[in-house]
Image: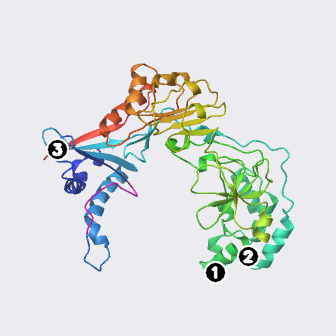
Amino acid sequence: MSSIRDLATWEPLLRLVRDAHAEQLAAPGGCFTGQITLGSWTLSAPQPHPMPGRALQVADMQDQFTAVERVQDALRADGASSVSYLVETAPDGRSLLHVVDLGPAVERGVVSPFVGALLLVEGAVPEPWRRLPEEMPGATPAPSADPELLERTLRERLPDAIGATEEEIAAAEARLGVALPDELKALYRVTRARWEEWGGDHAAEERVSNAVDCELFSLDELYIADAASRPCPWQFAADDAVVTAPDAAVQGLVGSPGWIVFGDNGGGDRLAVDLTPGPGGHTGQVIVIDHERTIGAGLRADSLTDMVVNRPDGRRQDRDADSPPVVARVNINYLDSVEAAARPELEVLCIGWRKGQPVSLAPVAGLPRLRTLTAVPGTLADPLEIAGLKGLEYLSLGPEEWRVLLDAGAVPRSLSAAGIEVQGEQRPLPTLDLADELLALWDRPLIGRTVLDAGR
């Protein structure tokens, strides 16, 4: 038996949970849920109160650290990265510990410590992550692009820098599978930005950053910011949409085989040379890939020369796609009806809390591009109307709505992933049962569960 399923692994944590949630666990049916990963945990243990005038110390939290580390050690031994758990009071007063292994077909939950999206088709990704850039036959470099001026300017600013050889540049191109634009070659001919060549001299690194106006990656660290480099859970990614306005400088993509990342702005956002610009952009423009967004990029400069020589301020982000007609949210803060969302361009429909009666899906039946539907519990007048939505790849519903579809044999077979919308205080075990029922329809691996008797 795996150590993660050994009661001794969990005993210190169980004591903390029982002490912190004694009232919650006093009655039969009371439960507490949590999750432990190699880098974080859910454990609402009592907060220590240090002496007045003294800050909280590591030693004050040692019981929590020790309890969690024992479980983390078991995860490492098993080659696992996370585990969910539930402490439940049985009808006879015993404590039961449910050790939950979500397995390869369930994403880790964000709101719930258990179930995120159910991955019904192995390897499937949401439509925006499949979208490739559109060709822009008329795209050209900006008038400001001047590799010779760029190289001359950088040599003046960095006279002692060690540049890359033509062989090293060719090797980088072979590794990336794309030819580097002339401006990027000019930059790395001046400096290849290898930390080991600076001998730990932070001042040398700072001189390069100041000269280039970013934290420059070495030639060996260049990478392609394609869609796979920007992963996002289905639960959130399915709500995104690729939109590129007719005058947009940057295509509204998740990623592109033409986005060559060469640096960082110092705040975690990546800078890339863009070889697949939008209809209003230029080949070789510099874009900023925001680490807090999952889709799209902002324009930093019309060219690498422009960024280094002229140092334009700020960046421009094209308008957001999260608005009708592509993405529509029907709730108390946005649209007030499904009819208002029903346009041929609609891809994502999210139905949340609103005033009035539950809504009908009849207005969006047959829309050619609708691929995502999410609805919080109790907002659909007739869940069986989902049968009229033929192109759904992601569907997230409350447990009762899923029950209607399952009992009628009406779960859409077009789905690649699914979500279970749980609101308020809900017992998690029925949610796990429902998730397994959906996974079984696609013959996917079920959620593993081990119940350990922790006594009274």
| Horizontal arrangement in the rendering, residue 430 relative to residue 201 (left or right) | left
Query: Which residue range is magenta in the image?
Result: 37-48
Residue at label 1? 203
| Horizontal arrangement in the rendering, residue 11 relative to residue 222 (left or right) | left
- Circle 2: element type: loop
Q: Is residue 267 magenta?
A: no
* Amino acid carrying mark 2 in the image: Ala
Residue at label 3? 27
Q: Which mark is residue 346?
A: none
- Circle 3: element type: loop
Which one is in front, 268 or 335?
Answer: 335
**Residue sitting at 19 percent across and 56 percent down?**
19
Mark 3 vs 2, N-terminal side = 3
- In the rendered image, which quarter is residue 402 located in? top left
Mark 3 vs 1, N-terminal side = 3
C-alpha separation, residue under disc 3 versus residue under disc 1: 63 Å
Residue 392 on image: x %, y %: 55, 29
